[in-house]
Amino acid sequence: MTETVSVELGERSYPVVVGPGVRQQLPDVIPSGVRRVAVITQPGIPWTVEPGVETLHIDVPDGEAAKSLAMVETICGQLSRAGFTRADALVALGGGVVTDLTGFVASVYHRGIPFVSVATTLLAQVDAAIGGKTGVNLAEGKNLVGAFWQPSAVLCDTETLETLPAREVQCGSGEIAKYHFLGGGPLDGLALADRVAACVRIKADVVAADEREGGRRAVLNYGHTLAHALETAGNYGLKHGEAVAVGLAYAAEVAVRLGRIDQTRVAEHYRVLAAYGLPTKVPDGLGSEDLLPLFVRDKKALDGITLVLDGPHGVEPVVGIDAGILADALEAVR
Ligand code: GLY
């Protein structure tokens, strides 16, 4: 079954199509009038697409290394030499690295050209490919250069998840667990395609309400403050979604210490994380002295430490949390 969710942004509204084989719908979602496209992908992505117009193929290196300003310059040079103009478009074929990079190139090449994402990982389908956050990394940190630039369409082909390594599925599950607490409810009982569609509906709703993260969109950062610290503090082998899982457990431990939620709700966090087989503990060797100072470097920290926490009014950003509570809650996830 195929489901189409619309991200409602007025004239820039676009469809996110979820289901097995939907990559074959690519010709239908290339904006009308586009003369040719550049398909940007990585050698490790075992899928191909047929855009239905003249196509330039651009391979970028596997892994996070592709998300660099140097790569943006390389791709823009290739587009320029091929004579690409605003009458042309880009297609991202891959996971979050490819959709972030391609979206950013699309936002800056000739001051902006259209792009379509064909998302082939669970993480990209439920999060990265939707909502128009595009960008690349600096040596100083992840996603520090970027733009809000919405795609013309996103195709979440659930057939591509069948070849995904178990660890990559786990990574997407960390984000899916997050949606449970953003109004998604018990998603773990659903078939995978329905679970993806449920997450897409929540994300589309949040993005439509707050495209540029002036407020509500910050809830999508639930579990991410500790997650980013875990990822930055060292190469301890946690993938993003796994780090988010530990971050969700931590956020519950902080919220209960602030009297925002009760022990039943904390237990619900651990039950959901266990249902997806996700970790809930900080890896050995990382102490609070390594992690807590990194909370203030989080991109979301506009005014000291901001944590997104569950509470009586649902998940929301909370400022001014006592340092003792932050440290004590960290002991609970060690
Ligand atoms: N991944 C968080 C957001 O799109 O806002």
Image (cartoon, rainbow, N blue to C red):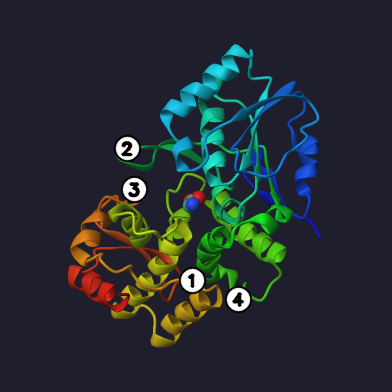
Marks 1 and 2, how far apart at CA = 29 Å
Describe the element under mark 2 as helix, strand or loop. Answer: loop
Q: Which of marks 3 and 1 is in front?
A: 1
Q: Decide which of 199, 204 is in the foreground and name it.
A: 199
Describe the element under mark 1 as helix, strand or loop. Answer: loop
Q: Decide if residue 85 is on the left or right side of residue 63.
A: right
Residue under label 4, please give it: 186
Q: Which of marks 4 and 2 is in front?
A: 2
Q: Decide if residue 300 is on the left or right side of residue 127.
A: left
Residue under label 1, please give it: 278
Q: Which of marks 4 and 1 is nearer the N terminus?
A: 4
Q: Decide which of 316, 237 is in the foreground and name it.
A: 237
Q: Which of marks 4 and 3 is nearer the N terminus?
A: 4
Question: Label 2 sits on what residue type?
Answer: Ala
Q: Which of marks 4 and 1 is in front?
A: 1
Answer whether labels 4 and 2 touch (C-beta < 8 Å): no
Q: How crowded is mark 3: few (under 14 residues within 10 Å), some or many (20 or more)?
A: few
Which residue shows up at 34% across the image and 76% down it?
253
Question: Label 4 sits on what residue type?
Answer: Pro
- Residue 142 is drawn in which quadrant? top left
Question: Label 1 sits on what residue type?
Answer: Leu
Q: Where is residue 76 drawn, in percent x and y?
A: 53, 21
Mark yes or no: residue 215 visible.
yes
Describe the element under mark 3 as helix, strand or loop. Answer: loop
Marks 3 and 2, how far apart at CA = 15 Å
- Residue 263 is drawn in which quadrant? bottom left
Q: Which of marks 3 and 1 is nearer the N terminus?
A: 1
Mark 3: is the Cβ under 8 angstroms from ligand 1? no
Q: Is residue 38 above or below residue 282?
A: above
